[in-house]
Image (cartoon, helix red, strand yellow):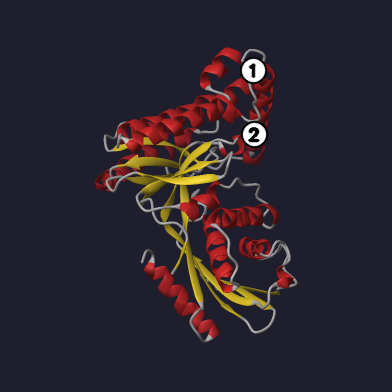
Amino acid sequence: MQNKEVYDELVAKFEKMYGAKPEIVAYAPGRIEVLGNHTDYNEGYVFSAAIDKGTFFAVSATADDTCELTAGDFMETAKFTTSTVKPATEMTWQNYVTGTFNWLFDGNPASAKHGWKGMFLGNIPLGAGLSSSAALEMCTVLALSKLYGIEKDKTAMAKIGQKAEHTFAGCPCGLLDQASSMYGKEGALVKSDFRYNTFETVEMGPKVAFMMVKSNAKHALVDGAYASRRQACEDAAKHFAGVLRKKVTHLRDVTMAEWVLYRSGLAETTAKRAVHPIGEDERVLQGAALLEKGDLAGFGALMYDSHESSRNWFENSCEELDTIVDTAKAIPEVYGARLSGGGFGGSCCLLVDPSAADKIAAQITKEYKAKYGDEPVCSLIKPSEGAHFV
């Protein structure tokens, strides 16, 4: 079992608190974004992977309508009933779980036949861009659906977690994080198509891994920057809908050749923003073909191209992330590197030969520390199994 020490600690704490082992334990992993940046809201394609760190959720039924939820790391407990589920302003960590419970019952958790007592514990580093919140939502929805005998497919469960994030946690995320956690597979990437919300796995083979390098870059105004990028993509899609002789609803419908030929009339900044998701969609589709042939070097080159597009066109990189990627380029055992997630700080994702992990981490740490005076956090990650029962 992966992360068995976390599972053992959770079950021991649950038993000590409630006097019996939990009826159900579910596990869900975090995720990394590998290729396809800011494409989800443009109805495009993304490559991601479930990681080898995650969160366990243990639960048992109660005899009445009372519910108890405990955060297993700092043993803080929230108490409520099935009819008093609402977004919390204190102990806000509970919102990922209570929101998921709420939407599992279509916004009417009072209709649940009984309450529950639950506890969660995980080992995903917080703030590293590895989506600990989606992991918590996915192990919650898996465990509670089994507890109540509710049948849902993986995509429906992912959408429940996304809705919890929107309405209870107040984060307007796409579906990438939840879907990656649900559909992950050992040694494979998850290829997502956000026009149709379809998800498939593409094998990578056992000889590669990823390294997440967490910068210490803290950037202000990220929310405003994200919103302005999204608005530019929508404005560009409207422009192309007016000039191309075909149906265009999102940038997914525009090719790079069409961008070159028909960008005239777009404000320069809007044109620059638009080229990034258009190029990313094409890179994901190219990447799928390269992986089928086992061409890891070719796939890695696309990751470097992706970062250059972020740096030059979308301008959602920063000096620290650029330093990590530029350092990675000089290390032969790194096949590719790019920023991961929204950008403006956070982490880089590197495609690496796992046998050289220590060498890679040491080199990147040395260069980064020389420039910024502090050390990045380097974590080796292997694509792993998605959410499941334990």
**Hey, what amino acid is under mark 1?**
Arg
Query: Looking at this view, is 317 or 178 the one in front?
Result: 178
Q: Is residue 375 visible?
A: no
- Residue 230 — which label? 2
Q: Which residue is mark 1?
A: 245
Real-space Cα distance between discs 2 and 1? 24 Å
Q: Secondary structure at mark 2?
A: helix
Q: Is residue 84 above or below residue 182?
A: below
Q: Amino acid at mark 2?
A: Arg
Instruction: Point out residue 330 in the picture as x, y percentages from the top left corner.
Output: 30, 31
> Going 55% across and 70% down the picture, which residue do you hit?
146
Snapshot quadrant of residue 232: top right
Q: Position of residue 87 (x, y in %)?
A: 71, 62
Question: Is the residue 244 above or below the residue 43 in the image?
Answer: above
Position of the N terminus, as image quadrant, is bottom left
Q: Compare residues 340 and 66 and report the one nearer the observer.
A: 66
Residue 64, image x, y percentages: 68, 83
